[in-house]
Amino acid sequence: MNTFKLISTASLLVFSMSTQASSIFFGEDLNPNGSQANSMAASTSFQSNLTGVGTEDFESFAPNTSGPIAIDFGVAGTATLSGNGDIGSGGGSGRFATSGTQYWETNDDFVIDFSVAVVAFGFFGTDIGDFGGQITLDFLSGGTTQFTVDNTVSAPDGSLLFWGVIDEANPFTRITFGNTNSSDWFGFDDMTIGVASQVVPTNPVPVPATLALFGLGLAGLGFARKKAQK
Ligand SMILES: [Ca+2]
Ligand SMILES: [Ca+2]
């Protein structure tokens, strides 16, 4: 029994360290016609940790262009977006552009393959969750790291969100976007990526104090248990 508890404690410690290595930036506005403050604050916070990054705004493509499409992130390289979806234009049915008039529109899976390994990725999403869908994200970095965007399920029509991640310890070369409900159409715009050299070194991603304390607490528990066994 004691052996199992010690192994379990060690696993939790690894998990908390892994969580410290990546930072998630998320904001959602269910009525963006009223305020976009939460999404914009998340975007600003994400961008403040990066410098010189490129953003794909989907304005250079003809409307209704489907994948695969070549997308350009400037200094951070290029990427190929393939899978389901096409270029939406002008907005409609709750989806809309966060820059210009165009965006990527889909109700199913699509994949982005990067020309070089990147450590930062962020995007705006529109009309997420009004038909019960959530965004799932699989990051390929040797193994696969999975995220589910914590958007509101059964949200009103036409919501806005920003989601981003910076994970310097696990550079990734591919992201697979998924949708938990294919009857829920999503819009995506202003995708930003960053390579390791574009993460601001003088403004490191802060380690959440509660997680640090959590880890120390578990370490202390493991130590105390070892002492008790002697
Ligand atoms: Ca756009
Ligand atoms: Ca939708």
Image (cartoon, grey):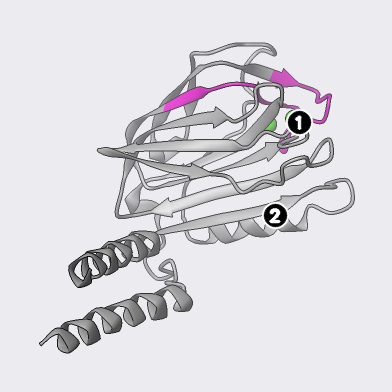
Q: Give the Cα distance between marks 1 and 2.
A: 24 Å
Q: Where residue 41 appears, x then y in whole percent?
A: 67, 60
Position of residue 98 relative to residue 103, above or below, is below
The first of marks 1 and 2 along the sequence is: 2
Q: Nearer the viewer, residue 110 or 198?
A: 110
Q: Residue at x 72, y 38 (%)?
A: 98
Quadrant in which residue 200 is drawn = bottom left
**Location of the C terminus (image quadrant):** bottom left
Cβ atoms under marks 1 and 2 closer than 8 Å = no
Circle 2 sits on which residue?
Answer: 40
Q: Where residue 124 appears, x then y in whole percent?
A: 64, 41
Q: Which residues are magenta?
A: 88-112
> Ligand 1 appears in which quadrant?
top right
Position of residue 226 relative to residue 129, above or below, is below
Give the numbered dot on residue 131: 1
Q: Residue at x 39, y 71 (%)?
A: 202
Relative placement, left or right, of 152 versus 116 is right
* Secondary structure type for disc 1: loop
Q: Where residue 102 appears, x then y in whole percent?
A: 71, 25
Question: Is residue 191 on the magenta stretch?
Answer: no
Crowdedness near tag 1: few (<14), some (14–19) or many (≥20) residues, C-alpha within 10 Å: some
User: Tag 2: residue type?
Assistant: Met
Q: Which one is in front in this view, the residue at disc 1 or the one at disc 2?
A: 1
Number of dots carrying numbers: 2
Question: Is residue 83 shown to the viewer in this render?
Answer: yes
Relative placement, left or right, of 209 versus 140 is right
* Secondary structure type for disc 2: helix
Q: Where residue 127 appears, x then y in whole percent?
A: 75, 34
**Location of the N terminus (image quadrant):** bottom left
